[in-house]
Image (spheres, helix red, strand yellow):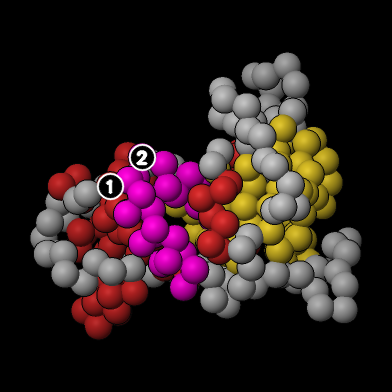
Amino acid sequence: MIGCSAGPLATVLSLEQVSYHPATVPRPLLRQVSMAVRPGETAVVAGPSGAGKSTLLELVAGLIQPGRGRICWQGNPMDRRQRHRRCGLVFQFPERHFLGLTVRQELQLGQRRLTEERLGAVLTQVGLNHVPRQQPPERLSGGQQRRLALAVQLLRNPQVLLLDEPTAGLDWSVRDSLLTLLGQLRTGRVLLVVTHEPKLFAPLQPRCWRLQDGGLEPYQEEQPVTIKPA
């Protein structure tokens, strides 16, 4: 297997010349996308709706396969199964993906050996330890639903945490508390966020890219970021 390029301090997650062109659209959604992120860093990819941000996360998470290019971990290319095992993806509207009838059931899905101690620890980690475990997920607030979706992924102990518009639809106070939580969760793992509001993530001092017309390019935080409305 051909390896991916890696420097002296190998980046944990790297994309090299990744392209994706579904047969149902006339032009590629992603064209020769390259980026690299180290553990403890927050990577923010900005772009308007329809730019391919969610597609980028789905590729990294192993839900779809790139037409060209490589997605690597510590310099080694990963197949879809390896990407799925290492990554935890939180969708833009996680409440649409909940399957459990209660908070407890939602956390237990796919976790046959989940102990009460582990369940309590992850709820405490995301700030939901005060929520009754028999509470239906649909009765949680928007911010609590995002936290529950994070808890579901944290039980898998992902090395890469992928977040699709995590602040969408939340008021300012809830956004601030969620950003504080994300700052804690990035310790020891890669945090990759896609958003059309990159300035909201400035407190995390992220490395930033802009995705537009299928191409990905870095930008400096001090430069103005113009995201055209969809």
Q: Does 62 appear in magenta?
A: no
Which residue corresponds to the image point at 57% horizontal and 57% vertical from the top-left? 202
Write the start and end of the magenta stretch as one range.
Answer: 162-184
Tell me residue 66's x, y (percent). 72, 42
User: In this rendering, would 194 be left or right of 118?
Assistant: right
Q: Is residue 21 above or below residue 152?
A: above
Of the residues under marks 1 and 2, which one precedes in the sequence? 1
Q: Does 171 appear in magenta?
A: yes
* Mark 2 crowdedness (10 Å alpha carbons): few <14, some 14-19, many ≥20: few
* Mark 1 crowdedness (10 Å alpha carbons): few <14, some 14-19, many ≥20: many
Q: In this view, does 1 lie above or below 66?
A: below
Give, as a three-letter code, the residue at label 1.
Answer: Gly
Between residue 176 and residue 145, name the one nearer to us: 176
What residue did someone put label 2 on?
169
Check the picture and name the quadrant holding the C terminus.
top right
Give, as a three-letter code, the residue at label 2.
Answer: Gly
Q: Is residue 158 above or below residue 171?
A: below
User: In this rendering, would 74 be left or right of 88?
Assistant: right
Between residue 225 and residue 77, name the one nearer to us: 225
At mark 2, the secondary structure is loop
What residue did someone put label 1 on?
142
Q: State if disc 2 and disc 1 touch (CB < 8 Å).
A: yes
| Residue 100 seen in the figure | yes
